Amino acid sequence: MTVKELLDILEEWAPQAYAEDFDNVGLLVGNPDNYCSGALITLDSTEEVVEEAIAKKCNVIISFHPIVFSGLKKITGSSYVERVVQKAIENQIAIIALHTRLDNHPNGVSEVLCKQLKLSKTEVLVPKKATLKKLVAYVPESHIASILEALHKAGAGSLENYKDCSFLLEGTGKFTGTAQSNPHIGKQMEKVTVSEIQINVVFEAHLFHRVQKALLDAHPYETVAYEMYQLLNSFSQVGMGRIGELEKEMDQLTFLNWVKKQLNTELIRHSPLTNKNIKKVAVLGGSGSFAIEDAKRKGADAYITADLKYHQFYQGEKQLVLLDVGHYESEQFTKNLIFDYLKEKLPNFAFVLSNIKTNPVNYF
């Protein structure tokens, strides 16, 4: 398997379109045409992780966080980022980063955190915008079934818990083929009137080219009449953070101890406690201060995230308790998520879970 083939598998699972615009994901170091001897799965790409990859004969590192986030102007080894990139290049090791592709994934970072906290009835906290498109196509009645089948196979018409969705309208198509045309119905220079069906299907934006190709391949016409629209609708399964419910509500001190136990941490920073019991819990792995108002608006009793600044703890305003459990602690289960998916997808390939704890924060 080549690096490119591995990238295609990751794209199918966690599409590039799920990533935020500010992010730097995908293949960061290496040649996509190189052969993969093994892949090391990690949360961060550090010098120690590169050494581990060398020792375990892995020439690919799949990392959650990108080692290169902003542009590099030089690679002299003067910073830890430059040294990692330099060492990876010297040893012909490719580095792939997923980051916000998994932050926005329906079963990604925050959903894994929900499972660790045993939350049920989970849904997206902050739906990602511009994730849906709509196809409107005009099809002769004779080909409606085959074209719908091709579109559904390409991923169109799948909406949350439903698939094979479409809306059809009957109508009349009219056209005249020029002297250069090769019409499927009628002849050149002949005015044609034909019964047609207008197909309406919604699909995830990253499937654009696949859906377009499916339509053009299945449609009998030489020139296909169709329209594509970007929808304002949000896809409620894709986005940052999750919100769900505990099986039984807890008082706040019991809840804090529960979180410490489930996340295996001895330190939680939190906002002033309220008199409310905890039942509905919002989570967002990594830096999540931007979603405090979303958690409040959705009625969370507690919001678990990381990297909160001093004044942001005031934003709980006694409506909910804010918990800063630490950046690493909130994302620590992500490398297992990546490993488990790939191991199930390719059981005979050499995927290796890194043994190195990459948390740069220490507690005294």
Image: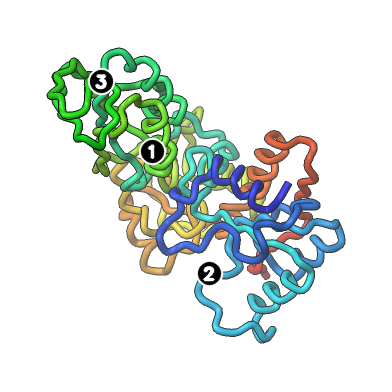
Check disc 3 and report its element: helix, strand or loop: loop
- How many residues crowd mark 2 within 10 Å: few (<14), some (14–19), many (20+)? few
| Total numbered badges shown on the rendered structure | 3
Q: Find residue 13 and report its image quarter.
A: top right
Check disc 2 and report its element: helix, strand or loop: loop
As shown in the figure, which amino acid type bears the numbered disc 3?
Ile
Which label belongs to residue 69?
Answer: 2
As shown in the figure, which amino acid type bears the numbered disc 2?
Phe
Q: Is residue 276 visible?
A: no
Which mark is in front, 1 or 2?
A: 1
Q: Which residue is mark 1?
A: 204
Nearer to the camera, 218 or 362:
218
Kindly report the distance in space between the C-alpha atoms of the residues bearing marks 1 and 3: 33 Å
Q: Earlier in the sequence, mark 1 or mark 2?
A: 2
**Residue at 42% in and 45% down:** 302
Q: Position of residue 10 (x, y in %)?
A: 59, 45
Q: Which residue is mark 3?
A: 185
Q: Earlier in the sequence, mark 1 or mark 3?
A: 3
Is 77 located above or below residue 244 in the figure?
below
Check disc 1 and report its element: helix, strand or loop: strand
Kindly report the distance in space between the C-alpha atoms of the residues bearing marks 1 and 2: 26 Å
